[in-house]
Amino acid sequence: MSAGLKITLVRSQIGATTAQRAVLNGLGLTKLNKTVVLQNSPEIIGMIAKVSHMVKVEE
């Protein structure tokens, strides 16, 4: 089974593009400093890559 990734939103969505906001909503990150734990999958890794400058990822 895949390990979990702990993802935290560290930059505001203000000024982000519509696509970036959609990715953050898809990840479940709606407010600043919110943390979610998601499974490590290629889809999630791709979403994190789109907003890597706005999130902090821990194993």
Image (cartoon, rainbow, N blue to C red):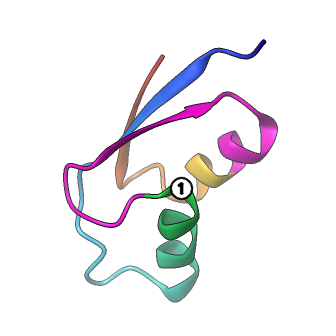
Name the kind of residue labelled 1 in the image.
Leu
Q: Return the residue nearer the eye: 20 or 27.
A: 27
Q: State whether residue 23 is above or below residue 9.
A: below
Left or right: 37 in relation to 43: left
Which residue is rendered at x = 49% and y = 69% of the image?
25
Which residue is rendered at x = 47% and y = 76% of the image?
21
Q: Quadrant of the N terminus?
A: top right
Q: State whether residue 4 is above or below residue 24.
A: above
Q: Quadrant of residue 2?
A: top right
State the image coordinates of residue 56 (x, y, percent, origin top left): 35, 37
Left or right: 54 in relation to 2: left
Left or right: 19 in relation to 15: right
State the image coordinates of residue 40 (x, y, percent, origin top left): 68, 27
Which residue is rendered at x = 19% and y = 49% of the image?
33
Q: Quadrant of residue 4?
A: top right
State the image coordinates of residue 59 (x, y, percent, origin top left): 48, 16
Q: Magenta region: which residues? A: 29-46
User: What residue would you read off at disc 1?
Assistant: 27
